[in-house]
Amino acid sequence: MHTNENCTTPFGIIEGFFGRSWGWEDRKKYAQFLALNGYSFYIYAPKGDKNLRKDWQIDWPVDVKKSLVDLRQVYHTANVQFGIGLSPHEIYLDNSCNQRTQLDQRIKQINQLEPDILCILFDDMRGDIPGLAQIQIDIAHQAAATSNAKKIIFCPTYYSFDPVLERVFGAMPEQYWQTFAQQLDKSIDMFWTGEKVCSTNYPAEHLAQVAELIGRKPFLWDNYPVNDGAVKSNLLQLRAFEQGHSQLADKIAGHAVNPMNQPWLSQIPLASLPLAYREKENYLADAAFTSICNNLCGNELAEQLQRDIHQLQDLGLKKLTQHERQALQTTYKQFTNSPYAQEIIAWLNDEYQFDPACLTE
């Protein structure tokens, strides 16, 4: 994979959240943002795209397919790798020849987009099935053999030690992760979210334990700043990535960040990750947040965001009084030309509703 100038670990974003999706123009604008900030890939995998999930066997409508072709071209022009995340929903419940034929056909349709990365994602699916790991390995190997992508990344059903996964998706089969270590082709990376589904840090000893368990360095699926869960949909997660992210480079295979439903506001925390990788032990999260806000939003709005960060990120919508909410609306309406302020106003107006399909917060 194309890697970042100052870091051998590829980092990028995966649009992999529930709820309100980004628009096509937002996705296109991100190509330049990612290129300018040293990100090396973008993966299209919105939970709202049913042709990647529940209706995975069916190709996109003509207009969506054209939008994806155009999007891929924009990313290639920006020298940012373009990926697709396919979730063949519970294909393993009917592990028949017909399903496998449909998988081949669907991947050949995805091949028309010439993706650099193909992700096979089994998150958010039932998992209490005997022999699940081997079935998923067979599917991943089949997908890799059919795909024209240069990189394959696999997401298991159990992608963290977080007990919420077994509560929601059933008991994990015995020897699940160990089977991947033994049987999954070493060229295929595996997503991992850390000790929790939404982890705030990734201790070195934890990453070493996971690498031993799955037989390869984990490819981080970082669920910060994503805000699609029952609790976090009430928050705008704007602060910079924590200092511990500056020490990850040699411990992981790659780093995919899942952003917020708000594409412009997501740029604020996203711009800090390359700084963490580059500055290492000299990285200071608070200073990064201040600097990035000034660079992206202008001084006046940046100062306002810093004043309001506790209300926006710590308290959130449900804990704001009606008076506080109205005061914030009045404040941000002053910044009429700022897309960052417009997203805050939309959030205050309840335009980013929680999607109950998100089960794992």
Image: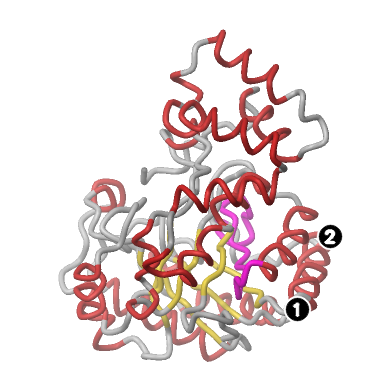
Q: Is 44 included in the stretch rendered in magenta?
A: yes
Residue at horizontal 43 percent and vertical 26 percent from the top: 315
Whether 212 is drawn above or below 317: the answer is below
Mark closest to the chain's N terminus, 2 or 1:
2
Q: Nearer the viewer, residue 105 or 277?
A: 277
Amino acid type, mark 1? His
In the picture, measured across the screen, residue 37 lies left or right of residue 258, that is right
Horizontal relation, residue 133 to residue 67: left or right = left
241, above or below 231, in the image: below
Q: Residue furthest top?
A: 323
Q: Amino acid at mark 2?
A: Asp
Camera-side residue of 64 and 54: 64
- Residue 169 x/y as whole percent: 30, 52
Residue at the (52%, 65%) spot, across then down: 275
Label 2, label 1: how many angstroms apart (C-alpha)? 20 Å
* Magenta run includes residue 313: no
Q: Which residue is mark 2?
A: 63
Q: Residue at x 36, y 61 (%)?
A: 193
The location of residue 347, given as percent across then percent down, is 62, 30
Quadrant of the image containing the C terminus: top left
Q: Nearer the viewer, mark 2 or mark 1?
A: 1
In the depicted view, which residue is nearer to us: 91 or 282? Answer: 282
Q: Magenta stretch: give its range.
A: 37-54
* Residue 183 shown left or right of residue 105 in the figure: left
Q: Is residue 354 above or below residue 220?
A: above
Residue 14 pos. (x, y %): 55, 63
Measuring from the top left, give residue 146's x and y in whole percent: 57, 88
Q: Secondary structure at mark 1?
A: helix
In terms of image quadrants, where is residue 33?
A: bottom right
**Residue at label 1?**
76
